[in-house]
Amino acid sequence: MRARITGTGSYMPEKILTNLDLEKMVDTNNEWIMARTGIEERRIAADDECTSDMAVIAAERAMEMAGVSADQIDLIIVGTITGDYPWPATACIVQAKIGAKKAFAYDVSAACSGFLYALSCANDYIRCGHGTKVLVIGAETLSRSIDWTDRNTCVLFGDGAGAVVVEAGEDGAGILSCHLHSDGNYLELLYQPGFGAKHPASTAGVDSRLQFLKMQGNEVFKVAVRSLTEVSIEALEANGFTHADVKLFVPHQANRRILEATAKRLHLTDEQTYINVHKYGNTSSATIPVALDEANRQGLIASGDLVLSAAFGGGFTWASTLLRWA
Ligand SMILES: CC(C)(COP(=O)(O)OP(=O)(O)OC[C@H]1O[C@@H](n2cnc3c(N)ncnc32)[C@H](O)[C@@H]1OP(=O)(O)O)[C@@H](O)C(=O)NCCC(=O)NCCS
């Protein structure tokens, strides 16, 4: 038995924030952002919109494609680091909103690797025979964790949500393997210092801007390219494939330079590599399901195609999934 993706869906908020808009907010310019990141614009959630709202729309689109109704779902997993509340899980809120009465639900916190970590959980759950239908979502409202006065980070990120329905199917098509890694020694290169148990909410903490994402960009860059390359090779080698067998590489969309450097090391062509970071920036756990949905709806993936996906994020965490499209 294999777990296979039978439906994809995504939702991006309407509001567009361009590089020209950012020029008015911080000391930056379109040329710098384009040259260093390839990002042209990003989406920002409306004031009354949060992570579960976007997740629900993406999930409903994925369920519609799969022909699966909410009451058939056994499990909902949301990869997110910007849930509606510190707790409970955003997955529980999604469950209530879509009316998935028999499902149990939990979040996975693995930053930008959150979706592939969640997909791995769904794969294990199905292959162990615990259930047959899982909703896997990556959704983020990063705009509320970004310091809009910090030009080092605010140009990079955006909001959005993507979802897939994963169902039990026969051997052959489906998820071939998932490879997951972490290294907590890199914590402070990419993290949000407040307001968890270590630095609970306080006025002093707000004054020190601890509630916002902090990053040492150039250090992250180097480890990201190396890790994405290694974990992608790990997936191909574990299944006896080479880069030439890959129909589409759908990596985490952090920035164009990371994607291009990784694709080059993997000997993947432009045609084999799906890139949409110019439109949305880095939406953390949402980038891969959104890209998968776009590629799927554009007809870039057909039944039988080999799809390779790889992610890297805070923790550090990194992961890959290789699948034969159903
Ligand atoms: C963030 C990133 C684009 C910065 O590019 P870089 O080439 O490493 O640039 P540096 O951080 O070395 O900064 C170079 C200069 O640009 C400046 N700079 C930073 N952000 C800027 C901005 N938005 N506009 C203009 N200048 C900026 C810096 O202050 C620095 O100036 P200085 O030399 O006077 O000190 C790049 O490091 C990167 O993409 N890192 C990975 C980030 C990421 O993807 N994180 C998420 C992973 S899941």
Image (spheres, helix red, strand yellow):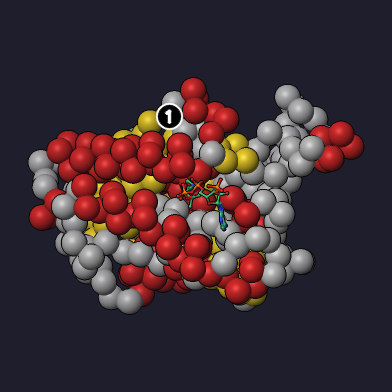
Q: Is residue 44 above or below residue 150?
A: below
Residue 191 in view: yes
- Residue at the (10%, 55%) spot, across then down: 244
Q: Is residue 99 visible?
A: no
Q: Kindly give the residue lying farthest to the right in the view shown.
A: 203
Q: Amino acid at mark 1?
A: Ser
122 sits left or right of 44 in the view: left
Q: Quadrant of the N terminus?
A: top left
Which is nearer the eye, 231 or 208? 208
Q: From the top left corner, tell me how far across and down residue 311 is, in percent.
A: 39, 46
Q: Which residue is mark 1?
A: 182
Q: Residue at x 53, y 69 (%)?
A: 30
Mark 1, ligand 1, within 8 Å: the answer is no
Q: Residues within 10 Å of mark 1 (few under 14, many from 20)?
A: some
Name the quadrant containing residue 160.
bottom right
- Residue at (20% x, 48% y) in the render: 266
Residue 178 falls left or right of residue 61:
left
Q: Secondary structure at mark 1?
A: strand
Question: Measured from the top left, where is residue 154 in percent x and y?
Answer: 62, 56
Identify the image quadrant of the C terminus. bottom left
The residue sitting at 58% across, 59% down in the picture is 155
**Image location of residue 284, percent across then percent down:** 51, 51
